[in-house]
Image (tube, rainbow, N blue to C red):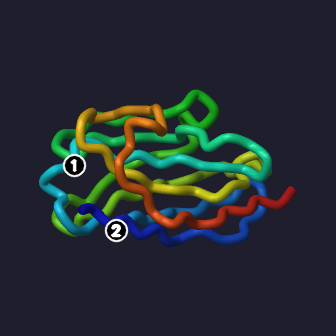
Amino acid sequence: QVQLVESGGGLVQAGGSLRLSCAVSGRTFTIYGVGWFRQAPGKDREFVAAISWRGVGTGYTDSVKGRFTISKDSAKNTVFLQMDTLKPEDTAVYYCAANQRYNRAWATSIYDYWGQGTQVTVSS
């Protein structure tokens, strides 16, 4: 089993920044990739960014490229999502997830383990 715990969400004004953290524990040696997803009220959960757990590759959805940065601290088994130039449309619950098959998958169905989510609210 793998456990993921997100933190760092909150309320921020448009144009501001937040950094989300995802602490990963358990059978971490089984992980191939970790991703960040978000879900706004009334909408489907969508891919935001992903990082290879065993390498250095990253991937982003187009709407966050140039504004968000995913990174990791392998020694601490923690993945970060630095979010800059935030927009009201970034408001959502943000989840981190781990999968045991692909380095940088974007499909929610690929992911095997999920955190509980952290709320990000961007005011205009």
- Looking at this view, is 10 or 100 the one in front? 100
Please report whichever mark, 1 or 2, sits nearer to the chain's N-terminal start. Answer: 2
State which quadrant residue 109 falls in: top left
Residue highlighted by disc 1: 31
Few, some or many residues within 10 Å of mark 2 (<14, 14–19, 20+):
some
> In the figure, is residue 71 to the left or right of 19?
left
The residue type indicated by label 2 comes to Ala
**Which quadrant of the rendered structure holds the N terminus?**
bottom left
Q: Answer above or below: position of 7 versus 74.
A: below
> Could you tell me which residue is drawn at 58 percent across and 63 percent down?
18
- The residue lying furthest to the left in this view is 29
Name the residue: 33% across, 42% down. Answer: 51
Front: mark 1 or 2: 1
Residue 53 position, x and y percent, is 23, 46
Pick out the residue farthest to the right.
Answer: 124
Name the residue carrying label 2: 23
With 108 as the anchor, is 98 left or right in this view?
Answer: left
> Would you place residue 54 above or below residue 3 in this image?
above
Residue closer to the observer: 96 or 100: 100
Q: Secondary structure at mark 2?
A: strand
| Mark 1 crowd level (few <14, some 14–19, many ≥20, 10 Å Cα) | many
- Compute the Cα span from label 1 to label 2: 13 Å
Say which element carries label 1: loop
Image location (x, y in percent) of residue 111:
38, 43
Q: Nearer the viewer, residue 34 or 76?
A: 34
* Amino acid type shown at disc 1: Ile
